[in-house]
Image (cartoon, rainbow, N blue to C red):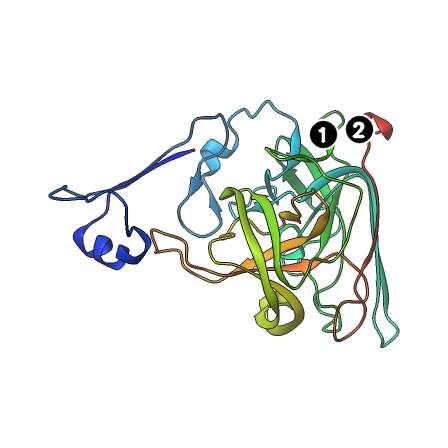
Amino acid sequence: MITILFLSAQELDSAKGSVANSIEIDDIAIRHRFELVLRTGPRIDPALGRLDEIDAEAAMSFPTEGGDVARIEGSNFFGTVGIAVSRIRLEAATRAGARYVCEGDRAFLSNNHVIADYDRAAIGTALRAGTGTSILGSFFPMRDILLHFDFALGINLSQGSFIGGTIRGLGSVSQVIRNPAANGESIRKVGARTGLSSGRTVGRTSIRSSGYQEQQRWFNGVYKTTQGFGRGGDSGSIVVSDSMDILGLYSWSDREEEAPFPTNFGYFFTLGPDQYPIGDGPSVAIEYGSPSDKST
């Protein structure tokens, strides 16, 4: 992607800290921001998490991989396919005794708030995952406030439409699923909005965000990233280490949509067990294989 920024004098003043030591810009008539996307695919509106519906249906002929657009069919709000696999099983139990299982064949992992609409979407809801069609298979309910993560599965990806265990532009993930170092670990992800981004972990925190049917609630034990790691529309991205170990699922960013240079912090959930201060983390089992491994 090539991004051309035409900045007003006021915008330029506000961005000075970010463009220090760069080319001096003088006497330029500033009017618009243009984004030239040099590949076939959906055009992403600069507004938070919105997809241009006309372009969304344009032909993307490549198979679905992690990093592609995920959304409920017919919705112009979108997130990201974390990873597509031949089979996945996630299990979680709270200390109050509730137990939940999310599993499915020809599946992809993303956020509940992306493909289950904060618990409001019915199981079987039609989904889009990159070029593939899918349905909502299961999700960890956000109504259970002892679950401190935001996961959902699309299942029954259309046959032959995905490459298992890969992230677009990064390649295959390793088969290691672990927790990152809370501070200073190098991390990467590919989001449907921002593409490839790199950063580091900068501690763990509790944040107040939308939960069951978008009611505000606290999520504890969330990993925080350096600034500019992600933006709206990147929700659902798999966060990986330099060695492509799976570290977690990106879910939120601070609001900075008007800034010409991203200044927001990002937040993601670990996929590792026993890392949450209330209740237990999920256990995860993945079969990465190809789409032909499972019959339709």
Quarter containing the C terminus = top right
Looking at this rendering, what residue extends furthest in the left direction?
A: 27
* The disc label shown at residue 290, or none: 2
Give how far across and how far down residue 47 sits, in percent: 41, 50
In-image side of 36 versus 70 (left or right): left
Q: What residue type is labelled 2?
A: Ser
Q: Do the residues labelled 1 and 2 touch (CB within 8 Å)?
A: yes
Quarter containing the N terminus = top left
In-image side of 23 versus 113 (left or right): left
Secondary structure type for disc 1: strand
Location of mark 1 (residue) = 163
* In-front residue for pair 48/183: 183
Give how far across and how far down residue 28 sits, in percent: 14, 41
* In-front residue for pair 277/209: 277
Mark 2: few, some, or many residues within 10 Å (few <14, many ≥20)? some
Q: In this view, does 55 lie above or below 183?
A: above
In-image side of 135 versus 41 (left or right): right
Q: In this view, does 181 lie above or below 138?
A: below
Seen at 50% across and 61% down, the residue is 265
Give how far across and how far down residue 55 sits, in percent: 46, 32
Q: Distance between the residues labelled 1 and 2?
A: 6 Å
Seen at 23% across and 53% down, the residue is 12
* 1 or 2: tag closer to the N-terminus: 1
Seen at 85% across and 77% down, the residue is 96
